[in-house]
Amino acid sequence: MAVQLMQEKWQGVISTVTIGATKEDGGSRSSTIKIGAEESLPCLFKEGAIPNKPRVAFEVWDVPPVDWPRELSQEFSDSLNDPFVWAGKCIKDYNAELICLRLQGAHPDYQDKSPEEEAAFIKEFIRRVNLPLIILGCGDDAKDNLLLPACSEAARGERCLIGNATQENYKAIAASAMADGHSIIAESPIDVNIAKQLNILICDTGLPLERIVIDPTIGALGYGLEYAYSIMERARLAALSGDKTLASPFICFVGQEAWRAKEAKSGEPSQGVMWEVITAASLIQAGADLLVMRHPDAAVKAGKFIDKLFYKK
Amino acid sequence: MNRYKVTFYPDNKVVEVVEGTTILSAAISCGVYINSPCSGDGVCGKCKVMVIDEDGKGRLSLACTSRIHQDFRVDVPLESRLELDPEIKNAAFESQEAEFKSVDSSGLGFKHDPLSKKIYLDLQSLDTGETLSDLDRLCCAVSKASGISPLQANLFNIRYLGELLRSCGWKVTVTLAKKNNGYEIILIEPQDNSANNFGLSFDIGTTTISGQLINLNKGVILGSRIAYNSQAIFGADVITRIIYSGKEGGLEKLHNLVSVTINQMIKELVEGCRVSLNDLTSIVCSGNTTMIHLLLKINPAYIRIDPYLPVANSIPPLRASEAGININPRGLLYCVPGVASYVGGDITAGILSSRLYKMKDLSLLIDIGTNGEVALGNEEFIVASAASAGPAFEGSGLTCGMRALTGAIESIKIKPDDFSVSYSVIGNVKACGICGSGYISLLSGMLSSGIIDKSGKITNTANKRLRASDSGCEFIVAFGAETNTGEDIVITEADIENLKRAKAAVYSALSVLIRHMNFKIEDIRNIFIAGGFGTSLDIDSAVRIGLLPDLERKRFSFIGNSALAGARDVLLSSQAHDETEEIARKVTYFELSNDSAYMDEYMAALFFPHTDLSRFPSFKS
């Protein structure tokens, strides 16, 4: 007699978030990307539909990063000085399908670029790069409050993913994303409850849940990865059990965290790349839908890992 | 060393102190009680007084940090005083007395059988008396008259018995008091004094002490008194008091403060009701475990050390005089038994007076005080927990918080279109601050008018009532021109955070308890709410902010000070007394700090009303 496998029946489904708008959708992107829509836990294909693969986004900065370790920066060499060349390299050499543009130059401690300057840059970037876009602020709550609405307007109609909205500054970001047709990233500090609270608060402003992606905040391998894993798992279990306020896809800033690990910067050949890949691979199994990565080799390896996991699809 | 004279107004009390004494300790030494929840650490800012120098100029100072270097006058403003004005005393009790009657008339009352009773006996007419000793003769007569036979007597009474009986012609009044499953002859008086039998019921709260004088023969309340627990000058909550009791002479001081307050209240009661102190034959006290320890001068230190054990939960009846309480020197003191360190006799009394332990349906008792206690159960079982909610709902630790007394804003309405505010103040005077029920209606109003979001952040800043301050944004409830002090009455984001934590602690305690017993919140048929803010609490607002569960409003009932009501039931009925023992044994204490689900529940409740909106269907947007 054949063994009957235990199968969980889930009531909930993760919402589908679309990034990028093609001509038909009123934008100018060459393609669109759909994430989310899972009806079961990661890789348990038999328990429910998992129509969308996790996706990898290549991180590009508006200004040359000053504190990136050599192992990471040498891969891009001169292209780091020009965001258009940098993005072009990701597309041409590594088949990037999604760019995550970080406006680090606006940070008061970096170059303190004005929202107008950055908005003009966004317009130019959209004209020259036609992939779907994630647009990140500089990480300073007060500045992002001014910066992100300006960028949202500049990217109007392109259905970008804009972030990060926190408990402190979600209002302005949610309002402008709603007006300009974007989705937003809701950031919470490794805390299921705050993730949930922030989703509720953002929905209260009128932005539908289907336009929110959760950044649960992660730690790299050896730096709290397990903690992030269990928080994502808890949120996903709650969402699949029917809690709509947590049923958003996850975005994980893998590159940012992995390259902070001292092991990644040790100088050992390919250790940093592997650090980033393993962090990404673990989080994919926790339910990550979107991985923002820095090293192109790591991004390519993570992509191959995803294809193997999803070979049936 | 120089000595200076300080005069306190409006008491008009003068005290001479050595140079460098703080105003606070000068005030304590002459019996002027100034509010000081932080026990004089200079951090709470609640002991503000007006120091008036020679040329009549006033300067606002903190009593705990200002030292005396010259003669001067100190005006203690209303909001810094640790006393209740008579109007409030009466108002607070009117409702309770009405409630007392309604409970009795509903037929749930106990059999009238007071803990101490007086019987008049004429021993001459006893026919079998010839060969019996005086004591046997007395016992025999008692058992004939009352049916009570297993008697204890003590040497004090036996020594005087012979002379007493013969000098008053064998006509005596015997007072019997319940003790150790039997009765003790506590008092023998000449002639017939059986009509004068009175007792006291007291609730010793961390913040407030309430007491009632009761005619034991008739079961009628003759008078009520309420006073602040003057231990509050050494800290607002039980933990600071326990810490203080560990300092040199601390236990002694705390004990004296509470017994002096009780004795003063007793004095006022007997004078007001024209009763002799000697006719007070018993007193029943309910209070949390720490308060009972301090009343009896038992070291409470072990209550706050793991595994959190009190010295005693159930205290046998004692001579009241041993605890320093002035009633008849032979009179007995009964303490309502407690369950555990943080679920004390006040909760046992609350369970008794709410009749929770007789309910067929699942019922919940919530006592919202400095410690939020919850008891869940029915006639078959009871579980209880305590959550440290903190004193926010008693108005402590908030920018403009105050207790529910004259001058406190007790309810607030906000117009959603222009945020204009209308409020009502206890005693219809100019507002001094906001009390617990005021904060609950304020938060609820701010939520529904969109001034704050569900996390308690002020979101809308374009209004004259909203402004930035050191501790985040603040909302002006009353402008300086309308208030007693001339300063604006405000609520800050930090206050909201504080209140949010307090309500989350209470709600999560009850929700963990309910889930632990495998029930759903909807299963609760009766919810009894006890505590300081009594009648002015608006249930809808309390549910709106997530303090109380979202159930049909008719399932809720206010029972006011249930600890005092329970103490009174015990005093008047030996059956009720036995039942408190039973309740205390029956209640299972559920320690929240050991429960992993509590922290999750607490975090999930840190939202208005809750992150799980399905639990609050009335407010689903």
Image (tube, rainbow, N blue to C red):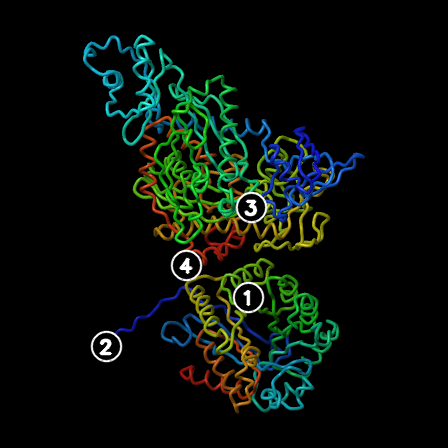
Circle 4: element type: helix
Side (left or right) of B365 relative to B494 = left
**In front of the other: label 4 or label 1?**
4
Q: In the image, what residue type sits under mark 3?
A: Ala
Assess whether mark 1 and mark 4 are in contact (beta carbons under 8 angstroms). Answer: no
Assess whether mark 3 and mark 4 are in contact (beta carbons under 8 angstroms). Answer: no
**In front of the other: label 2 or label 4?**
4
Circle 2: element type: loop
**In front of the other: label 1 or label 3?**
3
Assess whether mark 4 and mark 2 are in contact (beta carbons under 8 angstroms). Answer: no
**Residue under circle 3?**
B392
The subunit letter for the residue under badge 4 reads: B
- Which disc is residue B298 wearing? none
Camera-side residue: A274 or B138?
B138
Q: CA distance from mark 2 to mark 1?
A: 45 Å
**Residue under circle 4?**
B596
Q: Residues within 10 Å of mark 2 (few under 14, many from 20)?
A: few
Q: Residues within 10 Å of mark 1 (few under 14, many from 20)?
A: many
Q: What residue do we see at 25% from left, 22% from top? A: B148
